[in-house]
Image (spheres, rainbow, N blue to C red):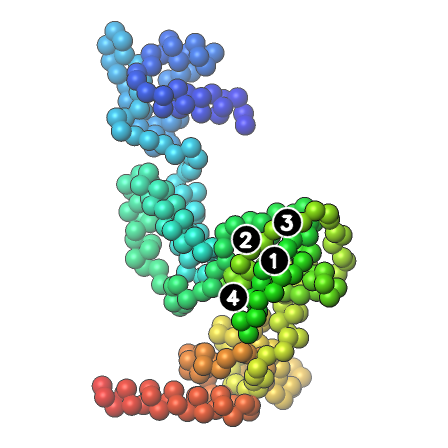
Amino acid sequence: MSRPTGRVLTLLELLQSGGTRTVAELADRLGVDGRTVRRYVGQLIDLDVPVESVRGRYGGYRLAPGYRLPPLMLGDDEALAVLLGLVAGRRTGLTTTELTAGETASAKIRRVLPKHVARRLDALLEALAFTDRPGGFDTPDAEVLLTVADAVRHRRPVSVRYTDREGRPSERTLHPYGIVAHAGRWYVTGSDARIGEDRTFRLDRIAEARTLPGSFEMPAGPDPAERVLSGFATAAYRHEVTLRIHGTAEQIRARLPAGVATLEEDEPTAGRDPAAERWLRVELRAERLDWLPPVLAALDRPFVVERPDELRDLVAALAARLASYARQA
């Protein structure tokens, strides 16, 4: 921090302590002359800090009555960035189970925003729409998340109480390589010390995490994100799905991203425009199938379900429901 910036922050601290400070007093405390004090006051006013000038024999400067500035000073664009990050985090599942923390943080920043910035934010939030439904994600415990993150940074083993997707609890010792946020969930990937193999665990299924003594060496190879995606690709799931969809890769990826499905041309043709619509083979694995028919309907592209038969039945059932709703209208 440069010395002038440090003096401006010191001036703010002096004013926050209450009362009216004379120019002479402030100049003495800051080690500058009166003209410089006035310049520093001007910089605070430019930051929307309500510094008032008090005239008279005992005049000087003071903060507007009742004004409280949070310890962290943010510019307009910075405050907007933080608030939008909190909103997006809640809507995409990248929060912890302490949901009220995000709400109270948003409220605190919102209260101290200048009116013109608050109006811009309100306008943006009114215009903003999300394709996902809020509150539908499984979020991790904040303490678990922080404990695991600390173990990743210092290469320390961690003991976790974990419940798998079948509801079976277990205690494991994990050498965590990294934390990965993917498709609205948090994961930790690392080596399961008991079996000596790499594993990926959902953080929301970890009830307790405790750092253990000792350390481990990070092995060479893919980074944590690549390890997680690779694990998804090879994991055993209840359903293996194969579709043929007519469209472009971009259209299909908008609803079925790379982390969810693989694409392959049904009949590759050399020299074909990659942006042209064509039949693409789509393969994916899933624990449940009920989410796929609405996704296929939202694609609004011709498609054929090759397997499994259960998905074909679910698509037909959705089509029948939509048709019945249309007739009622």
Q: Is residue 250 left or right of residue 194?
A: left
| Residue 221 position (above or below residue 100) | below
Residue for badge 4: 183
Helix, strand or loop at label 3? It is strand
- Neighbor class of circle 4 (other Cα within 10 Å; few <14, some 14-19, many 20+) is few
Q: Is residue 279 left or right of residue 319?
A: right
Q: Nearer the viewer, residue 207 or 121?
A: 207
Of callouts 2 and 1, the N-terminal one:
2
Q: Tell whether label 3 touches label 1 (CB within 8 Å).
A: no
Q: Tell whether label 2 touches label 4 (CB within 8 Å).
A: no
In three-dimensional space, the C-alpha distance between marks 2 and 3, rounded to whole angstroms, equals 10 Å
In three-dimensional space, the C-alpha distance between marks 4 and 1, rounded to whole angstroms, equals 23 Å
Helix, strand or loop at label 1? It is strand
Residue for badge 2: 144
**Label at residue 211:** 3
Q: Tell whether label 1 touches label 2 (CB within 8 Å).
A: yes
Q: Which residue is rendered at x = 36% and y = 32% of the image?
A: 69
Q: Which residue is rendered at x = 70% and y = 49% of the image?
A: 155
Q: Quadrant of residue 261?
A: bottom right
Residue for badge 1: 160
**Label at residue 325:** none
In three-dimensional space, the C-alpha distance between marks 4 and 3, rounded to whole angstroms, equals 27 Å
Q: Quadrant of residue 105?
A: top left
Q: Nearer the viewer, mark 2 or mark 1?
A: 1
Q: Amino acid at mark 4?
A: Ala
The reply to whether residue 225 is in sight is no
